[in-house]
Amino acid sequence: MLDAALQKLQQTLAAEMPICTPMGIRATAWDGRILQMEMPLAPNRNHQYSAFAGSLNALCTVVGWGTVFLMLEGRGLSGNVVIRRGSIRYLRPVHDERIICRGRPVDAEAEQFFFELLTSKGQSKIDLETEIADAAGVLVSFHGSYVVQD
């Protein structure tokens, strides 16, 4: 079931956000609460041979977007998901050949409120956090606010 959900997410990204394909962004894990996606450094590097800030921002944004997409899928729902606002902190350069971004756990109360509002009003919003980290700690921290309309 989860593999099918990741496959649907990947197909949706290819069709609806085609920039994800040349960037090499792909969904690699979903445990029902936390999404992990990755991209290669090579097509996303800058002149310093570290990851380009815009590519990191895109990856973090897409992980948040994908999390909302999969949350909806998990309940048999669909909707138009858009980012309302986002903020990012670049703490250290990213040099990994395979850049991995993970969502942070969604607060259970926030998730419940998100679905209650979506069901009763036909639209909702949720704030999500994603990060890119290595063994030494967080490299990039992202906070995004996403809106859904059915």
Image (cartoon, rainbow, N blue to C red):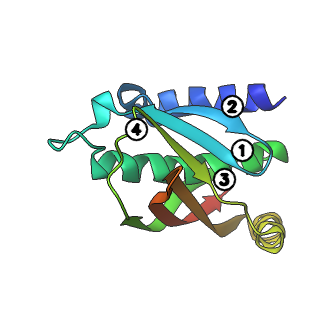
User: What's the distance in space between the residues labelled 1 and 4, CA to CA?
Assistant: 27 Å
Mark 2 crowd level (few <14, some 14–19, many ≥20, 10 Å Cα): many
The dot on residue 68 is 3
Name the outermost residue toward the left.
47
- Quadrant hosting residue 115: bottom right
Q: Which residue is mark 2?
A: 6
Residue 38 image position (x, y, % from top left): 51, 36
Tag 4's secondary structure? loop
Q: Is 73 placed above or below 143 here?
A: above
The amino acid type found where label 4 is placed reads Asp
* Mark 2 vs 1, N-terminal side: 2
* Mark 4 vs 3, N-terminal side: 3
Q: Which residue is mark 4?
A: 96
The amino acid type found where label 3 is placed reads Val
The dot on residue 98 is none
Q: Mark 3 and 1 residues: CB-CB less than 8 Å, in contact? A: yes
Q: Is residue 81 left or right of residue 42?
A: right
Tag 3's secondary structure? helix
